[in-house]
């Protein structure tokens, strides 16, 4: 066998997309699928994430073609790289729910749904699975890999590779994730529209963007959308926290008021502030009571509506300082961008990641690796063990590093509230 094709025994491959949508999802699926088809291998797209796989039963819940999955043809996948949405759908079903550490992998009750997924893949004749999703989907892929390691040596192994997907760009192991730049571009245009509105009406907009715990998306939107100020979780120091360590909304409101007053002194009677939704997780418990959680245990940050929460405080504290009223409006952005027409870069990146799945499985014979790129979209493969804590089996969020060049870029471009000395244009030297 050719040494460059260490996974040549793989004949049937499944593709699963899990979690929230991201622009250029179809570029990833199409490139991966076509790579296998052109090499004479069968490729199948499972509908709606793990939701059907985790319910599989050979008698009572059989998985059927074109009802629960699609056996792809070349015609299915050609010409869809720029298509919106996700050709196989998605869901947040979590077959690893309840597993919180390595010991749980020995618990038949806690691994019941993983066992069901594994059984479905084996019964349907799959040799490998391509997992496309965020950090929670990576965690599930790793659970499935570790579950198989517990099986007897003679048991069939289903190889797994993961393709990183999130508009939040909070992944270790890759510089930028597909969909990030499209989402930034889409929301930045909305922020530019709001800035024109704010300037015309001498108003203030507080724009909360998706991004979960990290500030990448809000920073991208703030920089590209020329926001007056952007704040992420990385910016919450002691000066913005209360005595218990939680984010103090009154201090945050005062920061915005300080911005408004600074801009007024410079003749700018309007502002657009971009806030990362992850700031809401830092609020005290009284703001989080009654807020639901998803299948992976995450707080539904959008339901807190941080921008709306701050608007009344900003208006009140502005009026208390100036004696004047200021119209302040909270806006949430995020869902609108997840299926926006994909940016050219995201289509190229997504396509390369899809091809990387084929190369990882067939050419390299890998298992338990994430496909990544660097430089000129050069492919490389990161072991799950490098991305996941072995004691907790959790992934680590990648935050913007305070003081990094990217962080400093936002600080340089936004309205700075420190005093700026008066200056005048000096005389032009004449010959």
Image (cartoon, grey):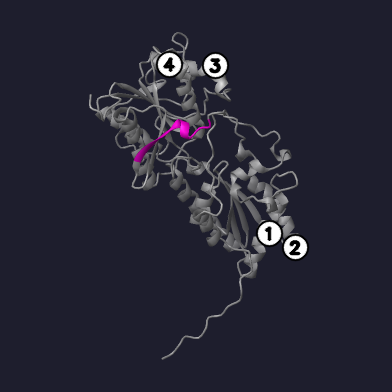
Whichever of callouts 4 and 2 sits on the residue coming sooner in the sequence is 4
Q: Which residue is label 3 attached to?
A: 106
The image quadrant that residue 323 belongs to is: bottom right
In the picture, which quadrant includes the C terminus? bottom left
Q: Position of residue 141 (x, y in %)?
A: 46, 27
Labels 4, 1: front one? 4
Q: In this view, does 409 lie to the left or right of 28?
A: right
Q: Distance between the residues labelled 4 and 1?
A: 57 Å
Residues 369 and 185: in front is: 369
Residue 422 versus residue 354 in the image, above or below: below
Quick check: 122 left or right of 97? left
Tell me, for residue 120, which label it has, or none: 4
Q: Which of marks 4 and 1 is nearer the N terminus?
A: 4
Marks 3,1: beta carbons within 8 A:
no
Q: Residue at coordinates 71% horizontally, 53% vertically from top-left?
A: 251
- Mark 2 and mark 1 lie on one chain; the one further toward the N terminus is 1
Q: How far is the residue under mark 3 from the one under mark 2?
A: 61 Å
Residue under the image location 62 percent in, 57 percent down? 204
Q: Give the range drawn in magenta.
A: 379-389
Residues under numbered marks 4 and 1 in contact, where contact means CB atoms less than 8 Å apart:
no
Return the residue found at the far top. 59
> Residue, x 74% and y 56% (percent of image)?
316
Residue identified by numbered label 1: 257
SS state under label 2? helix
Disc 2 vs disc 1: Cβ atoms closer than 8 Å?
Answer: yes
Q: Is residue 246 left or right of residue 214?
A: right
| Of labels 3 and 1, the one closer to you | 3
The residue tagged 2 is: 321
């Amino acid at each position: 066998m050719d040494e460059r094709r260490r996974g040549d025994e793989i004949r049937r491959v499944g593709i699963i997309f899990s979690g929230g949508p991201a622009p250029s999802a179809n570029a990833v699926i199409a490139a991966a699928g076509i790579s296998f088809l052109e090499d004479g291998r069968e490729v199948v797209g499972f509908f709606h994430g793990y939701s059907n796989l985790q319910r599989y039963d050979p008698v009572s819940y059989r998985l059927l073609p074109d009802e629960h999955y699609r056996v792809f043809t070349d015609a299915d996948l050609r010409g869809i790289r720029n298509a919106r949405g996700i050709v196989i759908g998605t869901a947040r079903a979590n077959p690893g729910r309840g597993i919180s550490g390595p010991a749980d992998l020995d618990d038949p009750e806690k691994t019941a749904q993983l066992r069901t997924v594994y059984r479905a893949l084996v019964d349907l004749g799959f040799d490998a699975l391509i997992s496309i999703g965020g950090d929670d989907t990576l965690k599930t892929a790793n659970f499935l890999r570790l579950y198989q390691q517990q099986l007897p040596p003679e048991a069939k192994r289903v190889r797994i590779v993961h393709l990183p997907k999130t508009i939040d760009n909070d992944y270790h192991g890759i510089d930028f994730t597909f969909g990030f730049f499209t989402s930034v571009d889409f929301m930045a245009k909305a922020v530019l529209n709001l800035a024109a509105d704010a300037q015309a009406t001498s108003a203030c907009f507080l724009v909360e963007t998706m991004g979960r715990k990290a500030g990448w998306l809000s920073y991208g939107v703030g920089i590209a959308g020329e926001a007056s100020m952007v704040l992420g979780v990385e910016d919450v120091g002691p000066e913005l926290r209360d005595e218990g360590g939680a984010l103090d909304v009154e201090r945050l409101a005062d920061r915005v008021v300080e911005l408004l007053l600074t801009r007024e002194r410079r003749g700018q009677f309007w502002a657009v502030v971009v806030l990362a939704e992850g700031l809401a997780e830092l609020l005290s418990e009284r703001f989080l009571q009654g807020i639901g959680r998803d299948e992976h245990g995450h707080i539904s940050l959008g339901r807190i509506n941080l921008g709306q929460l701050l608007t009344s405080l900003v208006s009140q504290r502005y009026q208390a300082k100036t004696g004047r009223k200021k119209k302040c409006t909270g806006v949430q952005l995020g869902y609108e961008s997840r299926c926006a027409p994909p940016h050219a870069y995201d289509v190229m990146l997504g396509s390369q990641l899809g091809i990387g799945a084929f190369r990882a499985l067939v050419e390299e014979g890998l298992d338990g690796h994430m496909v990544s790129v660097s430089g000129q979209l050069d492919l490389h493969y990161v072991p799950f063990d490098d991305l996941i804590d072995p004691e907790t089996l959790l992934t680590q969020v990648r935050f913007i590093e305070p003081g990094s060049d990217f962080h400093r870029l936002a600080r340089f471009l936004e309205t700075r509230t420190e005093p700026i000395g008066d200056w005048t244009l000096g005389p032009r030297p004449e010959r």
